[in-house]
Amino acid sequence: MDSLDDAGVYKISDDLAIIQTVDFFTPIVDDPYWFGQIAAANALSDIYAMGGTPKTAMNLVGFPLKQMDISILRQILQGGLDKMKEAGVMLVGGHSVEDSELKYGLSVTGFVHPDRVLTKKNLNAGDRLVLTKPLGTGVINTAIKGGVASVKVIDKITRLMATLNRNAAEVMKQYSVHACTDITGFGLLGHLAEMVDGTGLGAVLDSKKIPILSEALDYAAMGMLPAGANKNKIFRESMVEFYSSVNPLIRDLLFDPQTSGGLLICIDRDDTDELVEELIQKGSDASAVIGEVVSAPQEKIVVN
């Protein structure tokens, strides 16, 4: 409980450990089936971020039975089940309660070799930072709630959030990856702050190389920033230094809370180019080197 890692790890034997995680939330899209897919992909992501392979899952459901037709729940569960099948995960049970607000997610168990667990803190000065999905889902989801997002944008962001981090996780296992996390509710800078905090190391990011959804920039310019972005900024802004040349909209988007975001991979500089090339070949089209780990300033993030 002293660490800030993405999931719990329990060693079973010299060559096997289990990874356990749980995640659920309220709907972020109107389509029940796609909500189930997104919630499942989001829950599975923590296993991938720890270097593991998800194996089993259990459903977690809160459902307003008196306000919604049971067919909605069936669609949500089918979406989650289809995403689990895609990931090679077996559904072994679950629990539901009648609730005033709809909620869905998973408790997931995965396997990993004890020597291959990826944590957030195993950084080395000179390592490169690679991001596998573009930022901006929080802003776009706010635009969806505000009724200003087009059908095309809604479809694009829905499919992005429902995309598993499985392929990226499988690719990174072949390289000298030192640390990893997935980008979710604390935003890119919030999760990177967790990585450098207490390590005596810092990070430098190149704002021009960070993949950001163009639609998110448009909606951010309209003021469609989620409340969570401001909370993330208040919590971590003391650790972040922006160059004056960085666009204020990009500053906000680096704190934007993501749903089912990509992996942030800390890798030996000599393996970086090959990793990114293979990530792109295997479907993580937005993958990019966005910065590096530095010895100074200590436990700070500089964005230029």
Image (cartoon, helix red, strand yellow):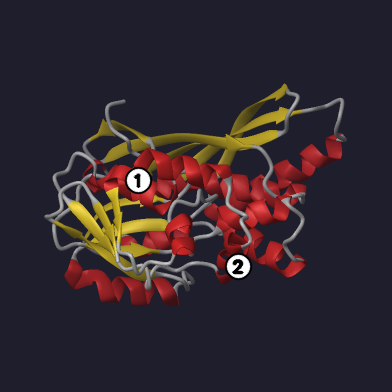
Quarter holding residue 102: top right
Q: Describe residue 297's horizontal placement relative to residue 49 as left or right.
A: left
Give the residue furthest to the top: 98
Q: Return the x and y of residue 300 as percentages of the image width and height.
A: 23, 49
Say if residue 279 shows up in the picture: yes
Residue position for label 1? 237
Measured as percent of width and height from the top left, residue 167 is found at 45, 63
**Between 230 and 177, the one nearer to me in the picture:** 230
User: 4 and 43: which one is in front?
Assistant: 4
Q: Amino acid type of disc 1?
A: Glu
Asked if residue 51 can be seen in this view, the reply is no
Task: Give the position of the C terminus as an image quadrant.
Answer: bottom left
Q: Is residue 70 left or right of residue 148?
A: right
Q: Earlier in the sequence, mark 2 or mark 1?
A: 2
Q: Residue at x 87, y 25 (%)?
A: 66
Q: Position of residue 198 (x, y in %)?
A: 19, 39
Give the side of residue 125 with respect to residue 63, left or right. Answer: left
Label tally: 2
Q: Secondary structure at mark 2?
A: helix
Indicate which disc residue 117 carries: none
Return the residue at label 2. Answer: 218
Helix, strand or loop at label 1? It is: helix
Q: Is residue 104 above or below residue 100?
A: below
Query: Dot 2, how many residues are within 10 Å of its Cα: few (below 14), some (14-19), or many (20+)?
Result: some
What residue is rendered at 31% in x and 25% in y?
Answer: 1
Identify the residue at horizontal 11%, vertical 55% (top origin). 295
Q: Cβ–Cβ below 8 Å for labels 2 and 1?
A: no
Vertical comparison of 1 with 79: above or below = above
- In 3D space, how far apart are the residues under numbered discs 2 and 1 (Cα atoms)? 23 Å
Camera-side residue of 22 and 208: 208
Q: Amino acid at mark 2?
A: Asp
